[in-house]
Image (spheres, coloured by chain):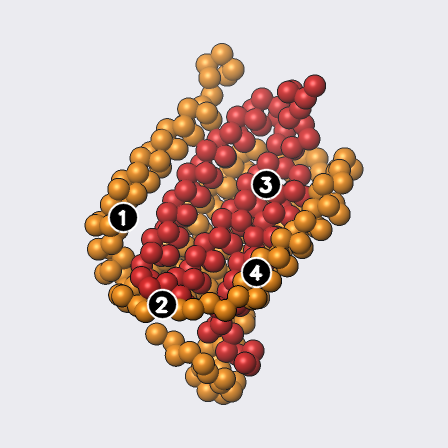
Chain colours: A orange, B red
Amino acid sequence: MIPLDTAPSIFSVNGVVGFVFLINIGITLLGAVAVAFSKKVIHAVAGLIVCFVGVAGLYFFLNSVFVSMMQILIYVGAVAITISFAVMLAAPEEKMASTRRGVIAGPLGIVSAIMLCISFSALSVGYTWQPLERINDGSMKSIGIELLTNYSMVFELISIVLLIAILGALVIARTRREDA
Amino acid sequence: MSILGLYNQLDCFLILGAVLFALGVYGVLAQQSFIGMLIASELILVGAAVNFMAFNRFLAPDPVTGQVFTLFIMAVAAAEAAIGLSIIIAIYRHYHSIDAEDAVQLKG
């Protein structure tokens, strides 16, 4: 557990940890900006991978090594690779003449995104949160016990959801014989 | 509070989650292709998951709950990516384009 209420210098251990955390924030925001503002789809995929690695670092700072590993394994290893395969299959770089963009994609989108960001930030900063007393330690062992006792129904349901998603993806993306 | 102690601040993580969410919303609105929209929607899900993990670390009485919730968010995001990409492939096969402006068959 990282101790609360510290104001470290850069040369102490906590200061180095804080510096690494700042780099981590930078990586995350860089990837997210690349996703939102890039013109080419493959640049957006690369930004997504960078952003996911940064978010995995954030989870590491939030005392959850297991979810951090799962973030890299599932998002970077599975989702981003699947998306890059779809980019290669669909070849979206043929024409990028972006002259037909409406008002929603331009100023209205920027204004709504900034308003969302400011309002959520004000909502979270303006409230004094009260921490509650811990009843367990949130380790990997307790995650496993909770997944197979309290959350076992959800655990089974999510496996069914994944199975149906895989079958649905196969059915939708299949080449039909009359089309081929 | 110095800037090097930011990793102990709940507000820092919450603002970061809000920024990720807002960038995702802007990406969904501004991207030209369907794949770009799908990528930006992944960013929205990640913003929500960062919020869950921050509350889980700093406030929750049972620190397992947020981690389990984040794992389920990852599973749902993986399912969503699989379905969405297969729909995009089907659209590409039909229209020979994944530009969102080209799929206008239902437009009146």
User: Could you tell me which residue is drawn at 49 percent across and 72 percent down?
Assistant: B9
User: Could you tell me which residue is drawn at 53 percent across and 49 percent down?
Assistant: B44
User: Could you tell me which residue is drawn at 57 percent across and 46 percent down?
Assistant: B40
| Spatial separation of the CA atoms under disc 3 and disc 1 | 32 Å
**Picture quarter with the C terminus of chain B:** top right
Chain letter of mark 2 equals A
Chain letter of mark 3 equals B
Circle 4/circle 3 CB separation < 8 Å: no
Helix, strand or loop for disc 1: loop
Q: Position of residue A147 (x, y in %)?
A: 26, 51
Reply above or below: B107 against A126.
Answer: above
- Residue that mark 1 sits on: A151
Tag 2: Cα neighbours inside 10 Å, few (<14), some, or many (≥20)? few
| Spatial separation of the CA atoms under disc 4 and disc 3 | 27 Å
- Residue that mark 2 sits on: A132
- Residue that mark 4 sits on: A123
Sequence-wise, which precedes: disc 4 or disc 1?
4
Chain letter of mark 1 equals A
Q: Amino acid at mark 4?
A: Leu
User: Could you tell me which residue is drawn at 75 percent across and 38 percent down?
Assistant: A101
Q: Is residue A105 visible?
A: yes
Q: Nearer the viewer, mark 2 or mark 3?
A: 2
Residue nearer the viewer, A22 or A88: A22
Helix, strand or loop for disc 2: loop
- Residue that mark 3 sits on: B37
Sequence-wise, which precedes: disc 2 or disc 1?
2
Q: Position of residue B16 (x, y in %)?
A: 55, 62
The image quarter containing residue A105 is top right
Tag 4: Cα neighbours inside 10 Å, few (<14), some, or many (≥20)? few
The reply to the same-chain question for discs 4 and 3 is: no
